[in-house]
Image (cartoon, rainbow, N blue to C red):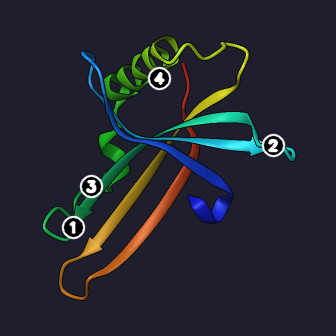
């Protein structure tokens, strides 16, 4: 994510609704003002569960929860609703025999 120019603001942010894995920001301009807030759900799986890709576990109910979590974060941090935000999903497949990881980043994977 850092390679994409994103700044990690929070990891494992918790509230009564649940937990956000990563909160990041895409900055713009010299002053580094926030252009977009990015809430990231990270899912991983190994070859012990080959029937499903990790991202398939972000079902409709999980998507709705992620939207509520993002809204709770904005409210708690008193962030203007004028700042654009999105929810991304990062899927990590781990080959437990070779320790090779396949990482996929889906931008704007969830919307309300």
Question: Within 10 angstroms of label 3, few (less than 14), some, or many (20 or more) residues?
Answer: few
Instruction: Return the residue at label 4.
Output: 70
Q: CA distance from mark 2 to mark 1?
A: 37 Å
Q: Is residue 39 above or below residue 69?
A: below
Q: Earlier in the sequence, mark 1 or mark 3?
A: 1
The C terminus is located in which quarter?
A: top right
Looking at the rendering, in which quadrant would you find the N terminus?
bottom right
* Residue farthest toward the left in the current orientation of the protein: 48
Please give the label number shown on residue 1: none
Residue 52: give its label.
Answer: 3
Q: Between tags 4 and 2, which lies in front?
A: 2
Q: Position of residue 37 (x, y in %)?
A: 62, 33
Which residue in the protein does label 1 denote? 46
Compared across the picture, whether 40 is left or right of 101 comes to right
Is 85 positioned to the left or the right of 48 in the image?
Answer: right
Q: CA distance from mark 1 to mark 4?
A: 28 Å
The answer to which of 7 and 104 lies nearer the viewer is: 7
Of mark 4 and mark 2, the one earlier in the sequence is 2
Can you identify the residue that label 2 sits on? Answer: 28
Q: Please state which of the two labelled residues, at mark 2 or mark 1, is closer to the viewer.
A: 2
- The image shows residue 75 at horizontal and vertical percentages of 50, 11
Q: Residues within 10 Å of mark 2 (few under 14, many from 20)?
A: few
């Amino acid at each position: 994510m850092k390679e994409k120019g994103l700044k990690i603001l929070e990891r494992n942010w918790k509230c009564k609704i649940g937990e956000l894995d990563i909160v990041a920001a895409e900055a713009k301009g010299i002053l580094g003002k926030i252009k977009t807030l990015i809430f990231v759900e990270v899912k991983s799986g190994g070859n012990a569960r080959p029937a499903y890709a990790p991202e398939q576990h972000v079902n409709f109910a999980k998507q709705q929860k992620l939207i509520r979590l993002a809204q709770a974060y904005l409210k708690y941090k008193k962030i203007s609703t004028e700042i654009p935000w999105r929810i991304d999903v990062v899927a990590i497949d781990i080959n437990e025999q070779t320790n090779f990881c396949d990482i996929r980043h889906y931008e704007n994977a969830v919307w309300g």
